[in-house]
């Protein structure tokens, strides 16, 4: 992969400067009633070395497993992504000179006539993986059917991964590539219908990128909507509180053991955890797209944070009890979906009985049917929301 300068490229001069602690762009205000400024803790040299080596080893193991699940011999023996059979290669891939090492994967709907040049709505998809794992290729099983079902253009984005590259490098990468995509005359993009979204940490990055684009682009409504699938969204919440917010008798959360090392890999020492580009749940509503769709998984330790974020963006009073049961909406919002609501341009959907990343995590064949059915319904809802709400 080509090396990249540590400093933002020249075009980033158009962005408001970042302060010494890589905080929010100066001039943008933080929401009121934030927790006191919290920063990442200082770790010993031994602990930093341990985290670094451990994360690199974990990346290697994860990449090997993903590689094996795609080999014909192992497909019959290893768990696979629920929609692995739907994964098709992109229409084409391309890179841009501003980030030559970052591949974009472009998916046209199968029925699209490329000779027509007819503009298509654009959905920009950001992969998850704790900022350290996966790649845009991992989301092929989502991008191809999502483009076909909704007759839209889907572009899966790449970014440099931790721990070799840390905040805000990923945000800079994505903003740089997105601006190149939107100015690419070879792509039939309907620039009045652009949305962004992501899975897990990719959802966090989608919310962060939306803020940067809204604050720096001449057209503040460049991004019409954002979809946050089970987002990482609040680094100020202690892990103990996140675990306590899960439903009773829900068992252990496999994410719990990895949260610390993944956060260390992404956030440099001294990073302000109340920065809305880090803890996107603390963003000003005015800095985000007019339409927001947030998805949480009931058994996910981050579900509580995601629902509180959605309620805050919708201007609703917090109604979640610590055992994970919703309070009454009291007529404040339209009840939609399996366990969700919609108000003031914000939609919330809780996927009951499922853990973080349920629709992308390799699963057994016996459980695959149930997961696929539930995930397909969620993705259909997301597509309809884009067409009828975000781009209406």
Image: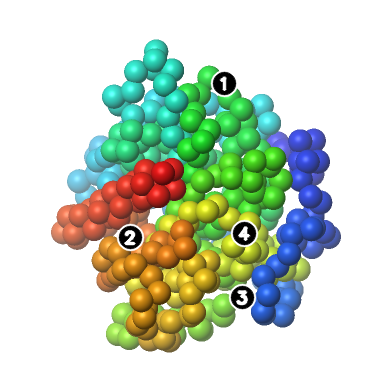
Q: From what the image shows, is residue 324 above or below residue 372?
A: below
Tell me how far mark 2 sits from mark 1, CA to CA: 37 Å
Cβ atoms at labels 4 and 3 below 8 Å apart: no
Earlier along the polypeptide chain: callout 2 or callout 1? 1
Residue at horizontal 52%, vertical 71%? 315
Residue at the disc numbered 3: 236
Residue at the disc numbered 2: 358
Which quadrant does the N terminus fall into?
top right
Q: In this view, does 25 lie to the left or right of 210?
A: right
Instruction: Please state which of the two labelled residues, at mark 4 or mark 3, is closer to the viewer.
Output: 4
Residue at the disc numbered 4: 286
Earlier along the polypeptide chain: callout 4 or callout 2? 4
Tell me how far mark 1 sits from mark 3, CA to CA: 42 Å
Q: From what the image shows, is residue 105 above or below residue 369?
A: above
Tell me how far mark 3 sits from mark 2, CA to CA: 25 Å
- Which numbered circle lies on residue 185? 1
Cβ atoms at labels 4 and 2 below 8 Å apart: no
Q: Residue 158, how many percent across, how many down?
A: 54, 41
């Amino acid at each position: 992969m080509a090396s990249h300068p540590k400093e933002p490229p020249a075009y980033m001069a158009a962005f408001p400067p970042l302060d010494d602690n890589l905080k929010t762009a100066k001039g943008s205000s933080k929401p009121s009633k934030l927790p006191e400024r919290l920063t990442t803790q200082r770790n010993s040299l031994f602990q930093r070395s341990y985290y670094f080596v451990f994360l690199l080893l974990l990346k290697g193991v994860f990449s090997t497993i993903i590689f094996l699940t795609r080999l014909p011999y192992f497909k019959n023996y290893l768990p696979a992504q629920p929609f692995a059979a739907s994964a098709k290669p992109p229409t084409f891939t391309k890179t841009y000179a501003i980030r030559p090492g970052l591949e974009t994967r472009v998916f046209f709907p199968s029925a699209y006539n490329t000779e027509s040049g007819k503009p298509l709505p654009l959905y920009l998809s950001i992969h998850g993986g704790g900022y350290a794992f996966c790649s845009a290729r991992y989301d092929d099983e989502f991008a191809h059917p999502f483009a076909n079902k909704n007759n839209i253009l889907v572009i899966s984005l790449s970014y440099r991964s931790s721990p070799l590259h840390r905040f805000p490098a990923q945000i800079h990468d994505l903003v740089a590539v997105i601006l190149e995509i939107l100015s690419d005359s070879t792509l039939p993009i309907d620039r009045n219908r652009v949305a962004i979204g992501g899975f897990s940490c990719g959802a966090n990055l989608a919310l962060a990128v939306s803020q940067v684009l809204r604050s720096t682009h001449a057209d503040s409504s460049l991004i019409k909507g954002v979809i946050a699938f089970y987002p990482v969204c609040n680094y100020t919440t202690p892990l103990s509180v996140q675990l306590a917010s899960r439903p009773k008798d829900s068992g252990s959360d496999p994410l719990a053991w990895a949260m610390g090392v993944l956060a260390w890999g992404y956030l440099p020492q001294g990073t302000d955890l109340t920065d809305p580009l880090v803890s996107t749940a603390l963003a000003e509503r005015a800095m985000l797209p007019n339409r927001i769709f947030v998805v949480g998984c009931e058994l996910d330790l981050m579900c509580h944070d995601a629902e509180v974020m959605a309620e805050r963006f919708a201007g609703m009073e917090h109604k979640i009890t610590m055992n994970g049961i919703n309070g009454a909406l009291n007529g404040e919002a339209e009840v939609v979906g399996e366990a969700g609501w919609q108000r003031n341009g914000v939609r919330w959907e809780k996927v009951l009985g499922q853990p973080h990343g349920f629709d992308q995590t390799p699963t057994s064949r016996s459980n695959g049917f149930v997961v696929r059915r539930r995930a397909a319904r969620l993705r259909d809802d997301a597509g309809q929301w884009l067409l009828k709400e975000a781009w209406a």
